[in-house]
Amino acid sequence: MILTKLGAAGLATNSALMTALSAVTSAETFSSIVVYATNDPPVIFPIADQVTAPNTPTRSIPFTVSDNETAAEDLIVLGASSDTHLVPDENLIFSGNGRDRSLIIVPAPAQAGVATITLNLFDSDGGVAEQSFNVNIAPQPETSLRLQRDGETLEAELGGSWRGAGQSQPPPRPIAQSSV
């Protein structure tokens, strides 16, 4: 029986004297035992789903990485989008070092929808971790109104509040008036 230290790896040579059944013959043989280390995969802590408006980058999204065998600053993070028309892979902007990293997601211009962002974390021993979350590029409601009447254009900002039950909404506040 050979016992090894927990978590130890390397090459050990064991020397043993083998004796044959005949008292006249004996031989010494050598054997090698190789103990391979197991690589614990790195870890990316979960990231919540994100929401942003079209043409608007997300806020900086912090996340944490770690690994038992590889120093945190040596871990490599790569990202991919499930919909590269909505969020191109090159629009995943990583920053930070050590355990504390961050990501900014920049949607493609004039696009709306949901994409799954998948982060892969690689350690120096070939271990890989994966973490996915959704980003919703949600269109915003219209906030302005453009009316044309009798050759004139009236632009107004929407969003006034209702005055109460049975009362109509106040008229839009003019922003600009021009003749067509």
Image (cartoon, rainbow, N blue to C red):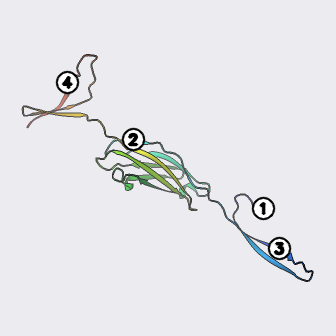
**Secondary element at tag 4:** loop
The tag on residue 171 is 4
Quadrant occupied by the C terminus: top left
| Horizontal side, residue 123 vs residue 85: left or right | right
Which amino acid does the dot numbered 1 rest on?
Answer: Leu
State the separation of the CA atoms marked 1 and 2: 54 Å
Nearer-the-camera pick, 25 or 77? 25
Residue 37 rendering spot, x and y as whole percentages: 66, 62
- Mark nearer the N terminus (3 vs 4): 3
* Position in image of residue 166 (x %, y %): 25, 16
Marks counted in the figure total 4
What residue does disc 3 label?
16
How far is disc 3 from disc 2 in space, using C-alphas? 67 Å
Which amino acid type is shown beneath numbered disc 3?
Ala
Q: Which residue is mark 1?
A: 3
Q: CA distance from mark 4 to mark 1?
A: 85 Å
Question: Answer yes or no: do the residues labelled 3 and 2 have beta carbons within 8 Å?
Answer: no
- Residue at left offset 59%, top offset 58%: 70
Residue farthest along the right direction in this orientation: 23
Q: Amino acid at mark 4?
A: Pro
* In the foreground, 61 or 3: 3
Q: Would you place residue 92 above or below residue 144 in this image?
A: below
